[in-house]
Amino acid sequence: MNFLFFSVHWADVVAEKLIEKGNEHTLATAITPSGPIHVGNLREVITTEAIYRALKDKGAEAKLIFIADTFDPLRKVYPFLSKEYEKYVGMPISDIPCPCGKHKNYAEHFLEPFIETMDELGINAIIYRAHEIYKKGAYNETIKTALDKADEIREILNTISGRNLPSSWMPFNIKCKKCGKMNGEIYKYDYPYAYYKCKCGYEGKADLRIGGIGKLPWRVDWPARWKIFNVTFEAFGKDHAASGGSWETGREISRKVFGYSPPMPLVYEFIHLKGRGAMHGSTGLAVATDEIIKAISPEVLRFLFMKYEPYRHIEFDPGMELLDLADEYGRYERAYFGIEEGKIKEAKRVYELSQPYGIKGNAPSVISYRHLAIIAQIAKNFGEAKKIIERSGIAIRNEEKLKERYEKVIYWLKNYAPEEIKFEVKKEMPEIELSEKEKKFLILLNKKFEELDWNAEKIHSTIHETAKISGISSRKAFQCIYKIILGKKNGPRAGYFLQSLGKEFIIKRINDAINLNHKA
């Protein structure tokens, strides 16, 4: 068993540290929906949510909030956008038209699918949209404080981050009344008014008592948010934790400007797309969460994050390794329910935290995803797949869950499976040539198969034994079987494959191959 051993799960360790500070906590997580929200982004949300669950399990008062940074400006025309979006660069993404025309705005185009995915994953967060928070005036007090203490903020940023901000710099970007872009720079401040100049040439006056007229820059917005929502915990990527980064400046601004003790931090490692580097939605080097959830069950996706400590680097591969991940999850599941021996003490908490909505009923099935991927390519529909599974002697404990997994495997096969795992069972005997040794092997194998108790292990071992007796290598023997069924020399693991096809079909196909080649 490849279980990762935790004496105590990392989420429980963090929860205990938070409880030492108090029994009421607000855990915050945030994402800018400027592009597809990907699996790398998901690490922050699920890490925070796991700690939220651990706090609740320990009896603490906890609140989980998710802030969509919908008031951020569009920074550039990303590869997935048409050139017409050039005119929107600098505008808040909540003000930009939806790329597909089906959502309220650009931000919602990427945000709504992610919120749906969060629901599938059982992430029950209070959702805020930054442009709405600003518009309602929630930031007004912190905006005034930031502008009143602009000199202090400027000194913190210059000292810690190594910037060289001019004495005229003010920590607030005004949304231009003319062009609608977040390019208004304040040149005069006399509360409640700010006088600004925009890059488009427009000059205007903004009433700071009106919500949504502008936005604090990120390094000031973040600590302001902590105070507004009384945040006590936040996880963030290692880029924010770098020397001189936004965490270092944020905690100083929080203490010295806003008079608020910064939240307990947790730094997490990035998720890389295997062999290609860290995921970035803006470059297209990513797998969107609403896309991958179509190919893998939500509990398996949660499992990916629950089994590794947040500081552990993860290489994500939506290809064959996704099947391996699913089958590893299956081992934890079977151990949890006592279907298979395993280190249940160590696996228990990982499995529990992997469930979107708690543990319900029994394990759905002992069938592996890899085996299911074979069956899905043999069966025409779920009904037929179910019959194959039952014929194989595998217990189906939860048909609804099994159907969900079957549908996700189908999607995986169509969109992520490498070509070497894909196959098509030929309806008729393929036109192939067999050597004399191959014919001898098939004749002997046919006799053995007729008397065989039809299960994967016995099928596999019988092929090896027959190959040895027939005087051909095991490799040639398996190639021969694949040729007569698939018309090519390779295919899925033979034991489960032949078991799934059924004894009657296999014996008939071997007979067809023997007879065809005798005629030839």
Image (cartoon, grey):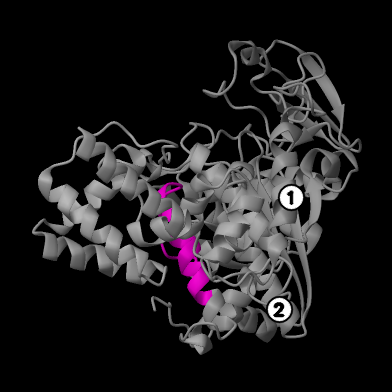
Does 84 appear above or below 447? above
Secondary structure under tag 2 reads: helix
- Lower position in the chain sequence, tag 1 or tag 2: 2
- Tell me which amino acid carries mark 2: Leu
Quadrant assignment, res 176: top right
Residue 313 vertical position relative to residue 490 in the rendered view, above or below: below
Camera-side residue of 374 and 407: 374
User: In screen coordinates, is 357 left or right of 478?
Assistant: right
In the rendered image, residue 446, in percent from the top left (x then y), is placed at 29, 58
Task: Find residue 252 and name its label.
Answer: none
- In depth, the one of 94 and 158 nearer the eye is 94
* CA distance for labels 1 and 2: 20 Å
Give SS at disc 1.
Answer: strand
Residue 323: tell me if it is visible.
no
Q: Is residue 465 left or right of residue 239?
A: left
Quarter of the rendering containing residue 86: top right
Name the quadrant of the N terminus: bottom left
Q: Which residue is mark 2?
A: 55
Which residue in the protein does label 1 denote? 67
Q: Which residues are magenta?
A: 309-332
Q: Using a 10 Å C-alpha cutoff, classify the residue at mark 2 as few (fewer than 14 neighbours), some (14 to 19) or many (20 or more).
A: many
Q: Quadrant of the C terminus?
A: top left
User: Which residue occupies the extreme front position in the image?
Assistant: 519
Residue at the (27%, 67%) spot, across then down = 462
Residue 286 highlighted magenta (yes or no): no
**Closest to the observer, 27 or 112:** 112
Relative to 362, is 189 on the left or the right? right
